[in-house]
Image (spheres, rainbow, N blue to C red):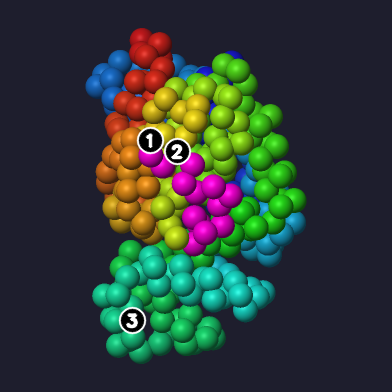
Amino acid sequence: MALIIGVHGIAQQQLGRQQLAAVWGPSLADGVEAALSGPHVGTLPLDLAYYGRLFLDVTRPAGAGSKGTQPQDELAGLAEDELDDLLDAAAEIAGAEALQVAEDQTPKSLMRSPRAVQLVLRAVDWRYGPGAALLFVGVFKQVRLYLRDARLKAAIDSIVDAAMTAETKVLVGHSLGSVVAFEYVRRHPEHRLTLLLTLGSPLGARFVRALMPDPNLGAAGLPPGVDAWVNVRDLRDPVAFAGDLAQRWQQIQDLPVDNGNDAHAASRYLGKRQTGAAVLAALPELAP
């Protein structure tokens, strides 16, 4: 009986449900133990809605963020309108100060990209650290695909629907998974959730909200069917750059964490005391 369903993020097309569950389960158990300050917990009633392989049919074999991939490689094949959207989104994430710094820098490794793209990607890396631009491009591509490709979205949504049961009380979404989880809530207001838990979420980003069917669902409080919504964010996470989600949904509880040198990692978000405490508040029976 899966009381908790997790929805993973981008760049998981080369893995599978069991491989990811081997990371998510122990990581979330660590978060619960951290919240308990001592007692050990056993295997959590957690399952994953795994959809990653669906992206193998719609992205290059290397996939977003693969080893050795460069940001300009991830731009290959993007149509002009996609590049325009990427420029707007990257400028939003970088901010004016980073864009000015990037303007003053001499182009180096991004010489093969158009100058405007070089500029915003350097700005993202300057603000968030090396590798942030690559991560952001991967998120941009897969979030955009999910929200714009009706067939892909329907296939992903059906996987989440199949994973959810009447017993499921907690829905956890990391990265793109938070968008997928929000879409589940929008599509199924009849399913009462004790907790919607989002980690490293891009739901506040303009480019994401512009593509969502109903980005303002529940903005005056919480979406229908959700008793509580906790959003956990590392302030240095380039995917969650848009800030606290309480700016969009009034009753969200935003919790800051420090994920060290891997700000967007699912395992680090799941293992935090704040994450574990949110799950325990929703499922107090997990405490020994």
Within 10 angstroms of label 2, few (less than 14), some, or many (20 or more) residues? Answer: some
Answer above or below: position of 11 versus 70.
Answer: above
Residue 60 in percent (x, y) is at 68, 65
Q: Are marks 1 and 2 in contact (CB under 8 Å)?
A: yes
Give the spatial CA distance, label 1 vs label 2.
5 Å
Within 10 angstroms of label 1, few (less than 14), some, or many (20 or more) residues? Answer: some
Q: Secondary structure at mark 2?
A: loop
The magenta segment: 207-220
Residue denoted by label 3: 102
Residue denoted by label 1: 221
Give the spatial CA distance, label 3 vs label 1.
39 Å
Q: Are marks 3 and 1 in contact (CB under 8 Å)?
A: no
Residue 56 in percent (x, y) is at 71, 55
Q: Which mark is residue 218?
A: 2
Judged by depth in the image, the label closer to the viewer, 3 or 1, is 1
Give the spatial CA distance, label 2 vs label 3.
38 Å
